[in-house]
Amino acid sequence: MKIDIDKDIRKAKTIPSRFYHSPKIYKKLRNLFDKSWQFIDDTSLLDKNNAHPGILLDGILNEPYVLTKKDGNIKCLSNVCTHRGNVVCNDSCNTKTLVCGYHGRQFEIDGKMKFMPEFDGVKNFPSKDDDLPEISMEIWKNLIFVINDKRCDLSEVTGPMIERMDWLPIDEFKYKPELSRTYKVNANWALYCDNYLEGFHIPYVHKDLNKELEYEDYFTEGIDNTVLQIGIGKDDETVFDLPKGHSDHGKNIAAYYFFLFPNMMFNFYPWGLSVNVVKPKSSEYTEIDYFTYVWKEELMGKGAGGDLDKVELEDGEIVETVQKGIKSKAYDRGRYSPKREIGVHHFHLLLQKYL
Ligand code: FES
Ligand SMILES: [Fe+2]
């Protein structure tokens, strides 16, 4: 499918609707996600255990990985045995050796093959190819990102976020499992992102949230692989106390919403951080993992980041309705509001660039 989005938002038409429901187009997205940085978790995972398995974007990439820690050094390794492809580590554990449960191959915690039964006489064995390959990983503060097929440095995606948010002691924020969850939405992943990328719908869909924000001052900017939205608060108590010298010092900022292409959302509130990872599962089904990190407990439940559950349910509902509408024969493409849909347009240009 050809995407032809005009760079001039005043002339542009949105993405053809097939993009949001065709299983054939969905299958072609693998490459895009393969070459995209993905947030997976934070380093506290490895405080007690030194091996933690996971699957990178199960549903589209399905890449088994294992995070390991040796002498304080964190690595992301392929979790696939180099013998005949069994998954090696199945549970988070504290161990000196990773042992494959199929034929007993053993790996050091840094991935080096250390022992294999019944392999006497095998030529050129072991070699580098018998070690568990590393998956590219970078850590910002305590947040772990990995990429399957490294196309660029992490900073090319996180740069604008770091520039504005580096002053926050994110590594001191507390991960709250009881406030973290997975939402299920019967809609295409990109439709969910489109909705996130505009505040246009706030007065219509989120009536309570709208009471907290100055709709007229809502700000959106597309910067490289990022879209930044800023919500300006009505109430002085639930805005950021920004340090002197910060580019937004003096503004009443209630929330920073960073979208990192193609599927991550980092939402900063005066109480802390909510990270959402949009996981495509099929052309019309998506799961969104919410990770909640609390900084100032006393501010929870207040301001724009107050009732995120309600906002999420409202978003899920509207996006599912759009999914039904978008499959209609009568609809193909729409137009953008140059004032309110800068973020959606920027996202569509990025999809055009990378697909
Ligand atoms: S597949 Fe792992 S030892 Fe055979
Ligand atoms: Fe919304």
Image (cartoon, grey):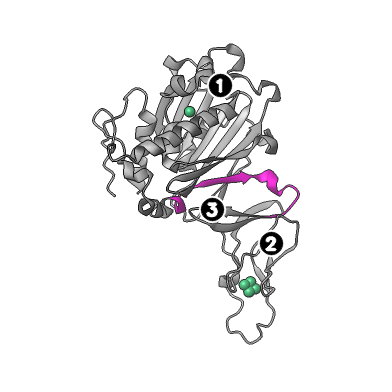
Report how far apart the C-alphas of labels 1 and 3 lie in the structure.
31 Å
Ligand 1: quadrant of the figure: bottom right
Give the quadrant of residue 216: top left
User: Nearest the camera: 294 or 321?
Assistant: 321
**Mark 2 closeness class: few <14, some 14–19, many ≥20 residues within 10 Å:** many
- Label 2 CB less than 8 angstroms from ligand 1: no
Q: Callout 1: helix, strand or loop?
A: helix
Q: Which residues are magenta?
A: 33-52
Residue 113 in picture, x, y percent from top left:
65, 70
What residue is at 53 percent from the left and 20 percent from the top? 209
Residue 58, which numbered label?
A: 3
What residue is at 28 percent from the left and 30 percent from the top? 335
User: Nearest the camera: 204 or 104?
Assistant: 204
Residue 109, which numbered label?
A: 2
Amino acid tagged 1: Ala
Is residue 162 covered in magenta? no
